[in-house]
Image (spheres, rainbow, N blue to C red):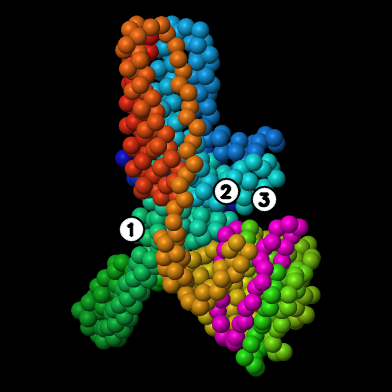
Amino acid sequence: MVDIQVKDLTKFFVIGENLLDGLSFEIQEGECVAILGRNGCGKTTLFNILTGQMDYDGGEVYVNPGKRLGLISQIPKFPEEFTVEDVLRSAYAQLTAILRKMELLECQMAKGATQEQLRQYDTLANAFQSGGGYEMDVDVDKICNGLGITAAQRSQDFASLSGGEKTRVNLARLLLEKTDILLLDEPTNHLDLNSVEWLEQYINAFKGTVLTISHDRYFIDQVADRVIEITEGHAEFYSGNYSFYMDEKQARFDLQMKQYEQEQAKLKQLGYTVERMKGWGINNRTLYRRAMSIQHRMARIRKTEKPKKERTMKATFGEKEFSGDVVFKMKNVSKAFDSRTLFSDVNLSVEGGERIALLGDNGTGKSTFIKCLLGEEDCQGKIQFGPTVKWGYLPQIIHFDHPERTLYDTMLYEKNCTPQTARDRLGAFMFQGEDVFKTVGNLSGGEQSRLRLCMLMDEKINLLILDEPTNHLDIASREWVEAAIEEFEGVLLFVSHDRYFIEKFAERIWLLEDGKIRDFPCGYQKYRSILEHEAAAKPQLPAQPKPKKEKPKGGSKDTEKLVRRLEREIEKQEQAIAELDQKIEAAAADYQELTRLLAQKETAEETLMELMTQWEAAQS
């Protein structure tokens, strides 16, 4: 069954320049498809068209009308008094309304139930159960645990959250809504590594359809069944994940180039033959006619278009020679805000040539650690740099002192270079033509990162510190940054949630967790293996049992013996469900075990509902 179909879709913002130009594709039920393409190619515009938030100029768009569609790109507005918990519970608006009606009927039936009330209650109870009403608390806890939304944060006002925290809560709300078609626009932004891994498991177990825009190559590898790349307004199709896409794209380029070169060689040879025959045919009409025949055949040959290599940036970090062994040392370094300690008693030493990833959950203090190292934040303890160390720093949040200046003026004033040098350096970072006269304040996050890198790479450094360097960058820009870093021979210290980037560069890992920094002298894969081994060895704490909910009573006695027997069976069944609730809470982070237990609970609740129906009939 087709869930989404786009046929000859056209969208333009400037007449004569189509952003989407005859875009066509189909998404089948249950597929997970990744949408790739450079920033500005129309990916988010496509999502806005699919959800009806934006009109289009030509073509056809079909979204299965029998399916619920959810988009995680814009954060809806909620009342100011809404807490995070209120926002999460808004996913259950229909079930909450049913529950209120059930509670009202319970109060009415306490004085004696009529057959009509029992029938209404039975209908509502079935709707509540089939909609997952009895699993609401477990589902909310499971998704909050997976996405790292803490119990303390759930009681906060939603309006007080940062943009990243709001995005995370909105993603949780969307997942709780149990939509049939998920549209995810950069879902891994603002998520830490544990949350991203949990989201991958969720999507892989999700039975609906997923269409995701992402620049997270590791994420695409884990979840995508196939890839659609938007290039010059058209769709290119790849029947596999990101690794398949990369291999297949290169294979297609090589094949097209080979066909092009063979055709050009053949045309060149035929052209040479035609010219010779024409020369010989001055006195020989037969040779001349044969030459013209070959020339007509050359015109009919289908010519393969020469494949284009994507325009790439060419730049490298300037390097300052480093002499000595130790780049920097940290001794008994600690940092606290009020009563909260971010890290304490940190003792680390870094030598020349090391490549270190600083990892940890959001909010643990990674960026603060970097600022303490560079002297931008006060801290306790001692930090000592080698005498020849010069560092360059790319912060997570880019700031320019004069956002009203153009890119061109920013280079002239801040780098003190000539006009031609400013043009050349900006051009190397793909700021060309009229782009150089944009004001810095109007640049996108990715463009600001690119400009800051442009300014940073001019400096002679031997310690490069990057805080989330791939944020806001499309895949092509990420690959360019990686190519520049590969050429850099100095010390690299970086904070990142991009596992592809971490796996490529980290040779040593610092994990900031519970106020301490653990030092792993290994790459990412071995680090993950160590953590998994430690997690498997930890004893599981038993979950606290949930208080048992009282079931409503109503109706009149039929046979006291039958009623007492049914009440005993109901009590046993309720006890069995309570035990399952304990197991479900303990398995909140294990999706497979959770699925099995929920299936058992559903069967047990069906049995309980049947007993309740018999009990109600007996009382009637």
State whether the magenta stretch is mostly helix, strand or loop: strand
Task: Give the residue type at disc 2.
Answer: Ile
Of 330 and 5, the residue lying toward us: 330
Helix, strand or loop under label 3 = loop
Residue 588 appears at what percent x and percent y?
45, 46
Helix, strand or loop under label 1 = loop
| Other residues around mark 3 within 10 Å, as few (<14) / some (14–19) / many (≥20) | few
Q: Is there CB contact under 8 Å for labels 3 and 2? A: no
For the residues labelled 3 and 1, the Cα–Cα distance comes to 38 Å
| Other residues around mark 1 within 10 Å, as few (<14) / some (14–19) / many (≥20) | some
Seen in the image, is 340 located left or right of residue 229? right
Asked if residue 458 is positioned above or below residue 111 in the image, the reply reads: below
Residue 364 appears at what percent x and percent y?
63, 61
Camera-near label (2 vs 1) is 2
Instruction: Determine which quarter of the picture holds residue 294.
Output: bottom left
Instruction: Determine which quarter of the picture holds residue 331.
Output: bottom right
For the residues labelled 2 and 1, the Cα–Cα distance comes to 35 Å
Residue 436 falls within the magenta-colored stretch = no
The residue under label 1 is: 239
Going from N to C along the chain, the mark reached first, 3 or 1, is 3
Camera-near label (3 vs 1) is 3
Asked if residue 74 is positioned above or below residue 189 in the image, the reply reads: above
Residue at point 26% right, 86% down?
A: 280
Residue at point 39% right, 38% down?
A: 580
> Which region is colored magenta?
335-362
Seen in the image, is 581 located left or right of residue 159? left
- Tell me, for residue 162, which label it has, or none: 3
Seen in the image, is 39 located left or right of residue 344? left
Residue at point 51% right, 55% down?
A: 195
